[in-house]
Image (cartoon, rainbow, N blue to C red):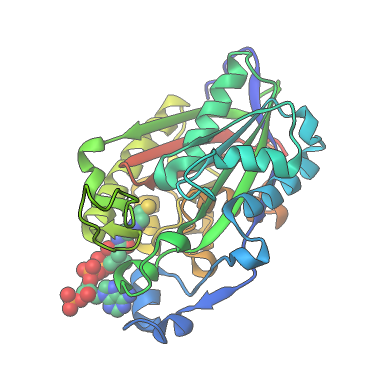
């Protein structure tokens, strides 16, 4: 295993938060032409949480709750943070960055704050940024949030998409430490040629009525599910293998795989290809659906709080999302 010298980026706290309201497959049967049987068999999803803004469940609210939990576990105060990085495509507003609203809500007054847009890969992309800012000596302590409230951009009449997603946030605190238990490496990739396999389409633009015709249409997600499925399996497999090789590891060395929770069939295809038995794969897709950038950090926090991770465990996190983007991170667990 490669242990690089110098400042070690170490995860010292995790947190997560999700909306109160659980929406089951049976609930969705009431609004679109679908069935619990279809959703469960094709995706592994049984329920998801859907936010309500009138319950203070905006993207920044969920992020702030997850962040405060992560800071508490880390034994750090918001003032210790040099940077707040939020991976999201569904900030409260087009601007400012959701990270600035999180900064305000948790009172991280010293930090610089910005968002990263990488679809469902937002958390792993943000973690990669944090890892390298710490290695470079530019920051000592960074809050990394993965969050999405995809429900605001779903067309609830489109059964192919609306059954797949849920809302939620996860956060980690990364600090400069030392020793072998650290983020060992993070690898990120994109393929813009495939952007139109999965994208969010704007709603009606606010244009001068005399200059362009106004065609009312809501914001909505467009996805070619079959193509996304195949691309997800092939790219996550290849990058996992590269990440393992980079650290002199094989799938057999991994204590726990944290895959992006998009579809149970994608997860098992990936696990088989990288030689990680399903008993070493953490999944909570049945309860959360696909929470986009929230998916991996929510799972990580849940696994840690349930006592399923021990210091020195080797973790592989693998993600995939719109862009197309994907990423893999190998971590020697430190808490
Ligand atoms: N309920 C019932 N039937 C549905 C349905 C739903 N919610 N959604 C689609 N169907 C129907 C389709 O209309 C189609 O019917 P037809 O055969 O009469 O045309 C049939 O089910 C099969 O559709 P198909 O799209 O081929 O199913 P699939 O097995 O590929 O599963 C996905 C669809 C979306 C679950 C699957 O392709 C997938 O998970 N893709 C990856 C999605 C993903 O991970 N996205 C996020 C990436 S970050």
Query: How many numbered discs?
Result: 0
Q: Considering depth in this image, is 247 or 28 the residue closer to the camera?
A: 28
Residue 285 is at least partly visible in this image: yes
Residue 86 location, x and y as percent? 56, 39
Looking at the rendering, the quadrant in which ligand 1 lies is: bottom left
Q: Considering depth in this image, is 291 or 251 the residue closer to the camera?
A: 291
Residue 181 is at least partly visible in this image: no
Please say if 44 is above or below 325.
below
Residue 162 location, x and y as percent? 38, 69
Kindly identify the residue that appears in the image at 31 percent across and 83 percent down: 33
Q: Is residue 299 left or right of residue 318?
A: right
Q: Is residue 100 left or right of residue 213?
A: right
Please say if 207 is above or below 306.
above
Extreme-bottom residue of the structure: 30
Please say if 85 is above or below 18.
above
Kindly identify the residue that appears in the image at 54 percent across and 38 percent down: 97
Q: Quadrant of the C terminus?
A: top right
Task: Name which quarter of the figure residue 158 lies in.
Answer: bottom left
Q: Considering depth in this image, is 75 or 19 the residue closer to the camera?
A: 19
Please say if 84 is above or below 171.
above
Residue 187 location, x and y as percent? 42, 30
Kindly identify the residue that appears in the image at 37 percent across and 47 percent down: 321
Task: Name which quarter of the figure residue 139 lies in.
Answer: top right
Task: Name which quarter of the figure residue 14 lies in.
Answer: top right
């Amino acid at each position: 295993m490669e242990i690089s010298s110098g400042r070690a980026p170490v995860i010292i706290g995790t947190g997560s938060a999700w909306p109160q309201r659980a929406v089951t497959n049976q609930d969705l049967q009431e609004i679109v032409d679908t069935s619990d049987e279809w959703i469960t068999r094709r995706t592994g999803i049984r329920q998801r949480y859907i936010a309500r803004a009138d319950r203070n469940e905006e993207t920044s609210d969920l992020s702030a709750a997850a962040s405060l939990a992560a800071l508490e576990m880390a034994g750090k105060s918001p003032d210790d943070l040099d940077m707040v990085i939020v991976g999201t495509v569904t900030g409260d507003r087009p601007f400012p960055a959701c990270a600035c609203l999180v900064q305000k809500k948790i009172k991280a007054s010293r930090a610089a704050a910005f968002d990263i847009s990488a679809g469902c890969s937002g958390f792993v992309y943000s973690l990669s940024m944090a890892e390298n800012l710490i290695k470079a000596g530019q920051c000592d302590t960074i809050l990394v949030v993965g969050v999405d409230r995809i429900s605001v951009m779903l067309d609830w009449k489109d059964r192919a998409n609306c059954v797949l997603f849920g809302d939620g946030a996860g956060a980690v605190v990364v600090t400069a430490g030392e020793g072998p238990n650290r983020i060992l490496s993070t690898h990120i990739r994109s393929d813009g040629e495939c952007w139109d396999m999965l994208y969010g389409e704007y709603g009606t633009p606010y244009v001068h009525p005399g200059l362009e015709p106004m065609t009312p249409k809501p914001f909505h997600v467009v996805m070619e599910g079959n193509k996304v499925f195949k691309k997800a399996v092939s790219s996550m497999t290849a990058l996992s293998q590269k990440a393992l090789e980079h650290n002199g590891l094989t799938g057999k060395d991994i204590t726990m795989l944290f895959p992006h929770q998009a579809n149970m069939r994608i997860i098992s295809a990936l696990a088989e290809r990288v030689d990680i038995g399903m008993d070493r794969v953490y999944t909570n897709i049945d309860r959360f659906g696909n929470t986009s950038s929230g998916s991996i950090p929510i799972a990580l926090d849940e696994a840690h709080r349930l006592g399923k991770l021990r210091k020195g465990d080797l973790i592989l996190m693998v993600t995939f999302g719109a862009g197309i983007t994907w990423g893999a991170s190998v971590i020697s667990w430190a808490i």
